[in-house]
Amino acid sequence: MSFSFQIDLKKGTVSKDTEKLNPDILYDLLVIGGGPAGLNAALYAKRKGLEVGIITKRKGGLLLDTSVVDNYLGIKEMSGESIADEFLRHVEALEVPIKDDSEVVGYTKDGEEHLLTLYSGEMFKAKTILIATGSNPRHLGVTGEDLYAGKGVAYCAICDAPLFKNKEVLIAGGGNSAVEAALDLAKVATSVTLVHRSQLRADAILTEKLKEDPKIKVHLETQIEEIFGEAAMKGIRVLHKETGEKEELYADGLFIEIGHLPNTGIFKSLLELNDRGEILVDEKNRTSLPGVFAAGDVTTVPYKQIVIAASDGAKAALGVNEYLNSHG
Amino acid sequence: MKMFNEEIQDQLREIFGDLKGDVTIALFTKEGECATCEETLSYMQEVEELSDKIHLERYDLDKDTELAEKYGVEMVPSIVLLDSNKNYRGIKFNGIPAGHEINSFIPALLEVSGNESELPKELEERIMKIDKPINIKVFITLSCPHCPGAVQKAHKMALMNPMIQAEMIEAETFGELSMKHNVSGVPKIVINDQYDLLGNQPIQEFLNTMEKVS
């Protein structure tokens, strides 16, 4: 059990008025999303002198669910959360107001003003908006997945790993997140079996660790067809694609780490998307609507990485600045 | 061993400068068979030392049965927060609120002291309208970054409406109860032992569920 403290001291304090998003201000830019893309965009926009605010479901975004980050230049083996804290501290030092725990559920345009309505009913307005809402865990889409979600089927390894102490778990996926989840879970579970429909595509440095861990078994070219159980999940039915054999693998839990789906929310029907549902953006992060920009994992920008999302956010803020300069 | 280093102590002292009134931490432990009672006690002692407004009172689940019943304490360790009039405001932590959960514990101290943050009016009205007894259990693990958010929301509603009681439950310490509620993902929110919500839900989702209870 971990007794270490991870204090987000900001959460305990009462925020000053300058740190609150103000419904009466017409912002130059409102950023939707508080992950690396949104935070970096706010940083760049603020430094350009723009009046900028952030609306986010959770400060830090997907970074918070990442156990260890070792591929961001200049940062060695830092927890996703510590990096999120550093990012946030940087942005908050510039007094950018952040509206936390808030989801945008409505978007309209009134003349040149973009109006955003939150789930709480509050409304905010801006000359430009930047959608940096990131992505949500992708689901397998097999029978039993919804039924056993939270009853064995899990999507956040760092959150739920302690609940699988001395239990047997399965991991679905073959990318970095899946392999990291397997390595994390092997520390507490009795056995870990990673199942992936094709070949591993995780970084070599991680797959080597995977092979060295005596607790971890790997099934490649193996398709998950069903999750079964009673009150809780009991196991999965798989198809070994090379032999055509079917097999039942029993376990107490299944962590699904098969990538992410763009979280386009209300913008799904308003903007042009590609066939994967990602928001189409040009090289300056403009979308199909004037004054509406998008950055990071929610867009067509390939390779969902922290460093890529962050740099995309910076680019978008500069694009916004250029747009505002030319539109007055 | 101290849980807070000097730097954190200083930061917490500053935060506790915002405490409006006095807050009492009523900690329930018991003799024997309590794996985390000692740690929780020393943790609470450290917190008490950081502000004159924070008072720690220690009770025994088996001996102080009347008080335990009054606050609905059934397991140990359990932390009940009392306001400046020593009133129970429906806020409890079962298990040690360490790790990430300090991010729900510190704000709870501030809120119980009278330093309440605002909610949008519409939500406030819906919360005040709840007129049936509601118990909200929020199951968490200490390594879960978005669990404190769910705990904070539940506690906030309890503070606003006396019909609502909210308790954090650390799922590892209370394994049996967690099994009973099939907790294998956190945060898991259980309302009146009957309705489940998975994940850090917005207050609206809590309300939608609580309004179903009849």
Image (spheres, helix red, strand yellow):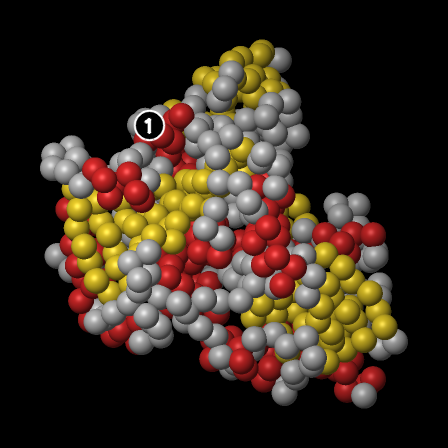
Residue B83, image x and y in percent? Answer: 33, 61
In-image side of A318 versus A168 (left or right):
right
Q: Residues within 10 Å of mark 1 (few under 14, many from 20)?
A: few
Q: Quadrant of the C terminus of chain A?
A: bottom right
Residue A3 % position (x, y): 26, 50
Q: Amino acid at mark 1?
A: Glu
**Location of residue A32 with respect to B89 vertically, above or below:** below
Circle 1: element type: helix
Position of the N terminus of chain A, as image quadrant, is top left
Residue A282, above or below B209: below
Residue in the picture at 33% in, 27% down:
B176
Q: Nearer the viewer, residue B213 or A149?
A: B213
Relative to the observer, which residue lies in front, B21 or A138? B21
Chain letter of the residue beneath label 1 in the structure image: B
Q: Quadrant of residue B49?
A: bottom left
User: Residue at position x 72%, y 52% from top?
Assistant: A265
Name the spot of residue A132 as percent of width and height, x first. 65, 62
Q: A137 or A101: nearer the eye?
A: A101
User: Is A200 displayed left or right of A282 in the figure?
Assistant: left
- Mark 1 = which residue? B176
Question: Can you tell which quarter of the image residue A119 is in?
Answer: bottom right
Residue A197 shows up from this direction: yes
Residue A100 location (% of width, % of height):
55, 63
User: In the rendered image, which quarter is residue A12 located in?
Assistant: bottom left
The residue lying at 61 percent from left, 57 percent from top is B125
